[in-house]
Amino acid sequence: MQQAIDAYLDEVMAHAALSRSDAARVRAELSEHLHEMLDEAGANQLEFKEALAMCANEFGDAKELGQSIRISKGRVRTFIKRRAKRTLIGIGVCVLILLGVRSTLAEAFLVAGSGVAPILPTGSRCLVYKLASNFSAGDIIAFHPAEQPGIAELAIVQSQDRQGNLVVTRNGRAPFTVNRSAIVGRVFLNTR
Amino acid sequence: MGRIDREGATDGRTQFLKGCARTLVLQLLSEEPMYGYELSQALAKRSQGIFALGQGTLYPLLYSLESKRLIRVAREEEAPGSGRKRRYYQVTPAGRAELEAGLMTWRDIAHGMRLVLGA
């Protein structure tokens, strides 16, 4: 009897194509129903084919039942539930990759001041390459100013010494030195 | 020809019964929580066999009502002796409102039928 119920429900569930949790629940519920029906009919000793026929007689064609359950559970909802785990993992991986890129390779900045205008005017965005180590005169860099290390400012490179420290300028300021450790990177893309 | 007519009549009856099943299931579950097999037996018994729905209709209907939040699983209990789980469904407040609407529709239809048919 159990084999017949399993065979029938395998076909139903194949056509229902539910999420794993819904499938387990629906299968358990239908199985309980068929067991109770067969127990009540005293069908414990039935041959496989007879028990299978009783299942089909009670619930109808396995394919039709599976498709009806699929529709009643909601195709969109089922699709989302089936894909939820994969989608969440995908989003998580993307976030980790973005965080990794942001902390090691490149970071985007919004230009809030006019320190390097008109090359990069206020309101434009720029992408800073954080692995840059050699700079040329005229490069625009992002750096953490000593007085406010929590923020980043932009400046134009004038020269670089042997230790990697930079002499830079900003509008309205005399040339000053940026320590190598305070350099974020070189601007390599902008939306000006 | 007669065969086609009879099949057509059977299809019409099946569709009509299916249409009624939603209201009947809500009614039974509004009286007390029941699990699937119990519900199918109660429906057949109380309707004297007229609404002995194919169970292939019952479970999709239950899942549809559940996904529309008209019924919900009230509790799960193990079946005595077997250890298999039974899921008891009950009507939600939205389901009660749906039931009331269904009953009103049914009364209107029954009244109209009686008026026309003179029964």
Image (spheres, helix red, strand yellow):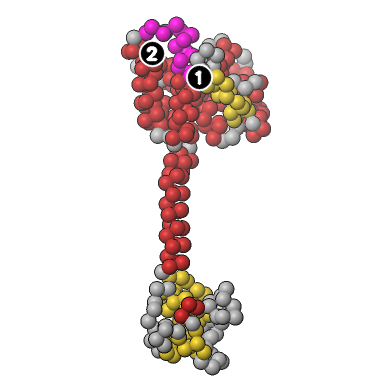
Q: Which residue appears at 64% of the width and 31% of the height?
A: B92
Height in image: A73 above or below A46?
Answer: below
- Residue linked to disc 1: B84
Name the quadrant containing residue A113: bottom right
Measured as percent of width and height from the top left, residue A59 is found at 43, 20
Which mark, by number, is residue B94? Answer: none
Answer whether residue A68 is magenta in the image.
no
The image shows residue B66 at horizontal and vertical percentages of 56, 32
Chain letter of the residue beneath label 1 in the structure image: B
Q: Is residue A59 shown to the viewer in this render?
A: yes
- Mark 2 is surrounded, within 10 Å at the Cα level, by few (under 14), some (14 to 19) or many (20 or more) other residues, namely many
| Residue type, label 2 | Met
Please provide percent x and percent y for residue A118: 49, 87
Q: Which residue is drawn at 46% across and 39% down?
A: A78
Label 2 element class: loop
Circle 2/circle 1 CB separation < 8 Å: no
- Bin the neighbour count of mark 1 within 10 Å (Cα to Cα): few under 14, some 14-19, many 20 and up: some
Which circle, 2 or 1, is nearer the viewer? 1
Q: Looking at this rendering, what residue extends furthest in the bottom direction? A: A174
Q: Main secondary structure of the magenta part?
A: helix
The residue drawn where x is 51% and y is 30% is B63
Q: In which quarter of the image is residue A122?
A: bottom right
Is residue B3 at least partly visible in the picture?
no
As measured in the structure, the alpha-carbon distance from the residue carrying label 2 to the one carrying label 1 is 15 Å
Vertical side of A13 occupied by A56: above or below? above
Tell whether B96 sits left or right of A182.
right
Q: How many marks?
A: 2
- Specify whether residue A35 is painted magenta: yes
Q: Which range of residues does the magenta coloring cover?
A: A32-46
Q: In which quadrant is the N terminus of chain B drawn?
A: top left
Residue placed under numbered mark 2 in the picture: A1
